[in-house]
Image (cartoon, rainbow, N blue to C red):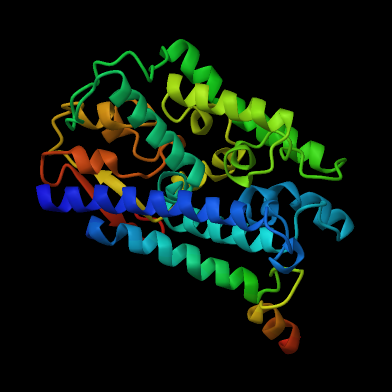
């Protein structure tokens, strides 16, 4: 399927952000300090 | 055609500047007091730190000093981009890659090239294009660097590349004599050879290289290509015969070749389905 090159940057950035969030939700978040809500969320879920 | 390519090139340059500034801000945050409240050290924001600490983590359950679990998230994000679009991370999101592009551009300007004309070879002496007989063997060095670091990581307390890492040398703002040396080598290399670090030494690029063969978002050439060679001239990674090497492991998916192509349909960006041929 042909895609417009104009959307290429958005595809890359979206992929990066989605996989980064996936990693954090899998529990690979920052370890130290406060203010990292997603880590707390995953810990709560676990 | 002109409008499309101009906007793509501009987007890339903007994203590259954001990557450089973003990495610099991470470095800046970590020279300020209270590092413990900032998610870990500068190293813990590095995708390659995830590779360096992967084997120790698998074998011992512990990450190397100065890294933490965040490295794995950044690595997953980088691999995610590679899974979708090959080495696009190198061409678009890597701060160090961006800096090399800027250094090459500034070098050309300093040596008298007033403006960049797409598809025309630069008349300035630097950056050089090394002869193929030297260039090709040197490109395998990055795989050796990757292998050496993976082995060393099993015996190391800190990430093995840490003391020589050009990202730390450029952005971490905490310099040591070895990092100064690394900075000088990196800058001199980038002036001499375009994308010097990416071509010959970057272990992250080596780890991402194979994804160029399997990623579904890729460039495809068609029979309308007349092999004019404009794309070869624009390729910062020095790939020869670009239209026939679009899945080359050296390609950083910057799309400068598409940008410079003047024949509609010769190069197209496509999403290939599983098993679909170009």
Q: Residue at x 45, y 45 (%)?
A: B212
Left or right of B248 on screen, residue A23: right
Q: Is residue B96 above or below residue B197?
A: below
Q: Position of residue B2 (x, y in %)?
A: 10, 47
- At x 50%, y 48%, the residue is B211
Number of numbered discs present?
0
Q: Is residue B145 visible?
A: yes
Residue A1 seen in the current view: no
Residue at the far front: name it: B33
Near-viewer residue (B132 or B166): B166
Viewer-nearest residue: B56 or B74: B74
Q: Is residue B204 above or below residue B190?
A: below
Question: Quadrant location of residue B168?
Answer: top right
Q: Image height check: is B177 above or below B175?
A: above
Q: Position of residue B157 (x, y in %)?
A: 86, 45
Where's residue B223, x and y in %?
A: 15, 38
Of residues B60 and B26, the one nearer the viewer is: B26
For this view, does B136 lie left or right of residue B260?
Answer: right
Which residue in the rendered view is the most extreme toward the bottom? A44
Identify the residue shown where x is 78% and y is 52%: B66
Image coordinates for residue B220, horizontal then vertical, percent: 27, 46
Q: Residue at x 76, y 51 (%)?
A: B53
Residue B166, picture quadrant:
top right
């Amino acid at each position: 399927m042909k895609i417009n090159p104009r959307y290429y940057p958005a595809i890359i950035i979206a992929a990066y952000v989605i996989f980064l969030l996936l990693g954090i939700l899998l529990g690979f978040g920052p370890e130290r300090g406060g203010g990292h809500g997603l880590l707390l969320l995953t810990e709560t879920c676990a | 055609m002109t409008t499309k390519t101009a906007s793509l090139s501009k987007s890339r340059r903007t994203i590259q500047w954001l990557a450089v500034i973003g990495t610099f801000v991470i470095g800046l945050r970590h020279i300020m007091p209270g590092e413990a409240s900032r998610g870990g050290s500068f190293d813990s924001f590095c995708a390659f730190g995830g590779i360096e600490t992967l084997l120790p983590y698998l074998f011992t359950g512990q990450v190397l000093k100065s890294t933490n679990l965040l490295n794995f998230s950044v690595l997953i994000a980088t691999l995610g981009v590679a899974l979708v679009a090959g080495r696009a991370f190198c061409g678009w999101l890597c701060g160090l890659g961006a800096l090399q592009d800027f250094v090459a551009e500034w070098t050309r300007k300093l040596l008298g090239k007033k403006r960049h004309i797409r598809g025309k070879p630069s008349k300035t002496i630097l950056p050089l294009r090394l002869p193929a007989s030297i260039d090709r063997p040197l490109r395998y060095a990055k795989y050796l660097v990757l292998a050496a670091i993976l082995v060393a990581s099993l015996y190391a307390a800190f990430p093995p590349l840490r003391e020589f890492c050009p990202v730390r040398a450029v952005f971490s703002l905490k310099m040591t004599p070895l990092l100064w040396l690394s900075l000088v080598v990196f800058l001199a290399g980038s002036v001499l050879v375009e994308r010097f670090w990416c071509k010959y030494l970057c272990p992250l690029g080596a780890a991402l290289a194979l994804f160029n063969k399997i990623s579904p978002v890729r460039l495809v050439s068609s029979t309308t290509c007349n092999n004019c060679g404009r794309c070869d001239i624009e390729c910062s990674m020095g790939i020869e015969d670009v239209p026939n090497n679009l899945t080359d492991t050296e390609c950083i998916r910057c799309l400068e070749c598409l940008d410079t192509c003047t024949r509609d349909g010769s190069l197209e960006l496509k999403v290939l389905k599983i098993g679909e041929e170009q």
